[in-house]
Image (spheres, grey):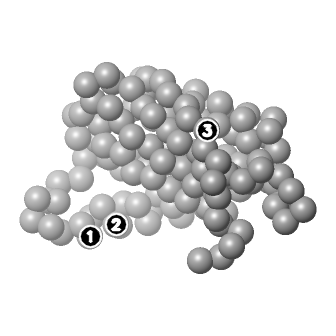
Amino acid sequence: MALKQIHNKFKIFTGALAADKTIGALADQITSFAAEHKIAAKSIGVEYLESAKKLIITLGYREAGADVETYGIKVNTVSLGKINGLESGDVSRLEAAMTDACEKIDNIICHELYITDDGDFLVVFMSRA
């Protein structure tokens, strides 16, 4: 693992799904936090809490320093739709949908997958701006 990816700071964001089931305005909050605090974003985690109808998003980062390059980020959510057939263990359709989605995003740092309570798959990509 590259030492530049190692991190030990976290910021948590929480809110409701947008009408289109994406993370909506939370994406802007994440990118604003990174810009305002001049951090190096390293990872993102997403959990959808069905019972509360809320997202919890964690941003892993490093603070600016002599050995830390800071940069702008973008956070995009891409709907993959409903992916059937996972019960059999065949994940090839999900892999293909994720690969297709990432071809629209440049400079991806990391991603996270979440599933809504009605079975829609969405992937969040964090990339360099």
Distance from Cα at disc 2 to Cα at disc 3: 29 Å
The answer to whether 116 is drawn above or below residue 14 in the figure is below
Residue at label 2? 95
Q: What type is the residue that disc 2 sits on?
A: Glu
Q: Quadrant of residue 33?
A: top right
Residue at label 1? 92
Could you tell me which secondary element the residue under label 2 belongs to? helix
Residue at label 3? 11
Q: What type is the residue that disc 3 sits on?
A: Lys
Residue under the image location 23 percent in, 40 percent down:
119
Q: In this view, does 87 lie to the left or right of 49?
A: left
Q: Are marks 3 and 1 in contact (CB under 8 Å)?
A: no
Q: Which of marks 2 and 3 is nearer the N terminus?
A: 3
Q: What type is the residue that disc 1 sits on?
A: Ser
Q: Residue 14 location in percent, x, y? A: 50, 28
Distance from Cα at disc 3 to Cα at disc 1: 33 Å
Q: The N terminus lies in which quarter of the figure? A: bottom right
Q: Residue 49 location in percent, x, y? A: 32, 32
- Depth check, mark 2 against mark 3: the one in front is 3
* Label placed on residue 124: none
Question: Looking at this view, is 116 or 36 the one in front?
Answer: 36
Q: Is residue 84 left or right of residue 79?
A: left
- Badge 2: how crowded within 10 Å, few (<14), some, or many (20+)? few
Q: Earlier in the sequence, mark 3 or mark 1?
A: 3
Q: Is residue 58 left or right of residue 9?
A: left
The answer to whether 94 is drawn above or below residue 30 in the figure is below
